[in-house]
Image: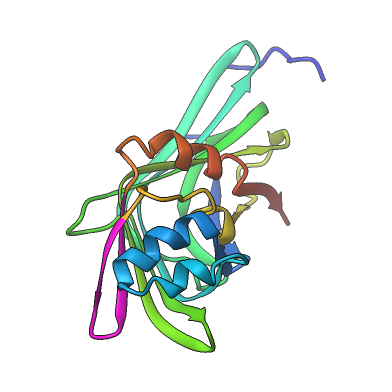
Amino acid sequence: MSKPDQPPIDDKDAASVSYEISAINPTYTLTPDASGRLSAIVGDKSMAKDASGGFDITWDTATARLREIRFSAKRGVDEVDFSLKTDRQIDLKKVPFLLGAIKIPKGTYQSVKVYARAEGDKNNPVVKLKGKLTWAGKKIPMEILLSGKIELKANGKDVVVTDTKIDWKGSLKISMDLILNKLQIGDFTGSFTEGKLTINVNVNSKLHDKVVNSLENSMSVEHSHN
């Protein structure tokens, strides 16, 4: 599809795109390699010996600290960005969860990309996951806390805005099982107190590229309207 000539952007003549997010694949399997580190934290070497198939983890709650949603695309010969900057906790288990709205002026948008940026620290984690790890018939309470900056990207189809009275919807889907599927020995620290396992992951450390790669295909987007 060619890139048509387009009139100048008029921010006052814009449609509203409401973004929502849904988490899929809530069950995650910890790899045998990461299980070796896990056994050291728990203090039970038998966990590493029994880890050939990994351990299943099911998340009961999952939250993230959203800082920005950004719509990026080609409009004619121009590259444009429209964004919503915020600071809110989103519930990844609520299907769907409304993130917020972005105003997009009339026009034809190609090479569409949507970014979701989450950011946090140890006191206010970027992602907090709570659930249970199943091992040897036992269900161990587990919490994973991620600190640092995470930016997810989704490639979308062309968006053509001709009537600004029409409300658009942007549906994002994030695959939970891809978030931590590349963690290995040394990638995380943790503690095991009173039967509860707590894992801490700093994604701004040397782990950053690994996390970015694992998140590369974890989010998708679809734009639609009535």
Q: Is residue 73 above or below residue 194?
A: above
Identity of the residue drawn at 72% across and 33% down:
158
Residue 20 location, x and y as percent? 54, 59
Q: Which residue is rendered at x = 43% and y = 77% of the image?
A: 131
Q: Quadrant of the C terminus?
A: bottom right
198 or 39: nearer the viewer:
39
Q: Is residue 15 visible?
A: no
| As drawn, 171 above or below 53 | above
Q: Quadrant of the N terminus?
A: top right
Q: Is residue 49 magenta?
A: no
| Image-based side of 121 in relation to 4, left or right | left
The reply to whether residue 190 is in sight is: yes
In-image side of 91 versus 40 (left or right): right
Where residue 134 appears, x then y in whole percent?
51, 80
Q: Nearer the viewer, residue 13 or 21?
A: 21
At 50% across and 72% down in the image, what residue appears? 93
**Which quadrant of the figure has residue 74?**
top right
Residue situated furthest left in the rendering: 123
Residue 164: x and y in percent read: 61, 42
The one nearer the camera, 38 or 72, is 38
Residue 52 quadrant: bottom right
* x, y percent for residue 206: 34, 35
- Residue 111: which quarter of the image? top right
Q: What is the tally of numbered marks visible in this picture?
A: 0
191 in magenta: yes
Which residue appears farthest toward the bottom when viewing the image? 137
Q: Residue at x 38, y 39 (%)?
A: 207
The magenta segment is 189-201
Instruction: Give the vertical position of 69 relative to 206 (above or below).
Output: below
The main secondary structure of the magenta stretch is strand
